[in-house]
Image (tube, rainbow, N blue to C red):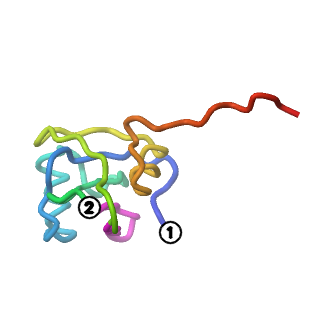
Amino acid sequence: MIGPEVAARVYLACGVTDMRKGITGLALLAQDHLRQKPTSGAVFAFRGRKGDRIKLLYWDGQGFCLYYKVLQRGTFPWPGSGDAVARLTRAQLAMLWEGIDWRRPSWGEPPARVG
């Protein structure tokens, strides 16, 4: 998959975002509400009202990339604190994209016996 660099910072816009917004509208949200430079190379995540869709906005050095995902079942786990912003790790972003609750990942038991 073509995507952000490994060291990219990830910012999650808490609360609800109007999913009708395109690249320009989301870049303005990143700048005005998240207080970040949209062309910094960071990834900005936004979730819709129903919770079943997210958009990721990313500047790759030449232009903006917009990733959009709609879940067939369930919702994306999301903090609901209005205009707040959360900082995620790359691993948390990967879990979020897969619909896994990145706030409380469920890890399996370690093997009882190795070897």
Q: Is residue 55 above or below residue 92?
A: below
Give the residue at x 53% y 68%: 1
- Say which amino acid is labelled 2: Asp
Q: Position of residue 46 (x, y in %)?
A: 24, 55
38 relative to 65 in the view: left or right: left
Q: Nearer the viewer, residue 100 or 7?
A: 100
Q: Which mark is residue 2?
A: 1
| Residue that label 2 marks | 52
Can you name the residue that lies furthest to the right here?
115
Callout in the foreground (1, 2) = 2
In the foreground, 6 or 46:
46
> Predominant secondary structure in magenta?
strand
- Furthest toward the top, the residue is 112
Q: Residues within 10 Å of mark 2 (few under 14, many from 20)?
A: some
Q: Position of residue 14 (x, y in %)?
A: 19, 44
Identify the secondary structure beneath mark 2.
loop
Q: Residue at x 46, y 38 (%)?
A: 105
